[in-house]
Each structure stands twice: as C-alpha cells, then as structure tokens.
Image (cartoon, rainbow, N blue to C red):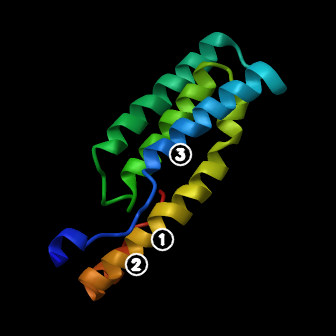
Amino acid sequence: MDTAASDGAAVRFPPPFVYAIALVAGALLQGFVLPLPFGVSFGARVAVAAVAAGLGVALITGIYRYTRNPMYVGMALLQLAIGVGFGNLWIVALLPLVLAIIYAIAIRHEEAYLERKFGETYLAYKRSVRRWL
C-alpha cells in the first residue's frame, strides 16, 4: 500500500456539503414548516449580506495568519450572507449547528493529523492563531 496516498486527515464527509445541506434545510423549514420573520428591511439585509459574502470569499482564499480554518469560516460567512440576503432566519440559525458538525467531522481530524505530521511546529501555530477568528 502506498503510504503517501493514505496520508491525510481522515475526513470522511466533504465539509462543503454540510453547508449546502443547511441551506436546503433552512429553505425547507422557512417555506414549509415555520417561517421565521427577519424584521430587517430589504436594503439593510442586502448590505449585510454583501459584506458577509465579500468577507467569506476573501477568507476562502486563505488567511492563515488570522484563522486556522479560513475556508470553513469563509463558507460560514457565505451561509450567513445567503440567510440574511434571503431573509431566512433558519439558514442563519443553523449556522452554529453547522460549525459544530464541521468541527466534529473535519477540524478535529485535521488538527490531529497536522499535530502528528508537524509536531511542535503545528502546536506553536495553534497557540498563535485562533481556530475560527
């Protein structure tokens, strides 16, 4: 067996799918179960959504000096932007659950792998850079 091919963090479920599932679940909950009023004007929602989306896209490109998980934070900001932009509080409310799932299925495995692979270098990085922001 090629050990280089098996070298990895053992993430079994693609994290972007977790965000996608939350978007679909939020849309279904809003449309068919219990619509949650947003209570903010359309213009304000669009402005907040645009800022969150812009920050999300910027973080996805990787700002590892400020967060150890820029792609996950970026996708979270995009989920927030979509929820706010569409006035869907379910999508926004599902965000903490999504982040907990992302931690459970991806981040903890990735961090354990990086600790094994890079040892003290990664541990020093963990001490100096936050997991989220």
Q: Amino acid at mark 3?
A: Val
Disc 3 from disc 1: Cα separation: 16 Å
Q: Is residue 75 above or below residue 37?
A: below
User: Can you tell which of label 3 and label 1 is closer to the viewer?
Assistant: 3
Give how far across and how far down residue 54 sits, in percent: 40, 30
Q: Which residue is mark 2?
A: 112
Q: Is residue 44 above or below residue 69?
A: above
The spot of residue 56 in percent (x, y) is 42, 38
- Closest to the observer: 50 or 15? 15
Q: CA distance from mark 2 to mark 1?
A: 6 Å
Corner quadrant of residue 12: bottom left
Identify the residue at horizontal 68%, vertical 31% (top origin): 26
Q: Which residue is mark 3?
A: 18
Q: Mark 2 near mark 1, Cβ–Cβ under 8 Å?
A: yes
* Amino acid type of the residue tagged 2 in the rendering: Ala
Farthest residue, direction front = 1
Query: Where 2 sits versus 47, above or below?
Result: below
Q: Residue tagged by mark 1?
A: 108
Residue 31 image-quadrant placement = top right
Residue in view at x 47 percent, y 28 percent: 51
Q: Residue 34 in the image: state x and y as whole percent.
A: 84, 26
Badge 2 density bin: few <14, some 14–19, many ≥20, Cα 10 Å: few
Kindly tell me whether residue 29 is visible in this rendering. yes
With 29 as the anchor, is 97 left or right in this view?
Answer: left
- Badge 1 local density, few (<14 within 10 Å), some, or many (20+)? some
Q: Residue at x 40, y 57 (%)?
A: 69
Assign a secondary structure to mark 2.
helix
Task: Name which of mark 2 and mark 3 comes first in the sequence.
Answer: 3
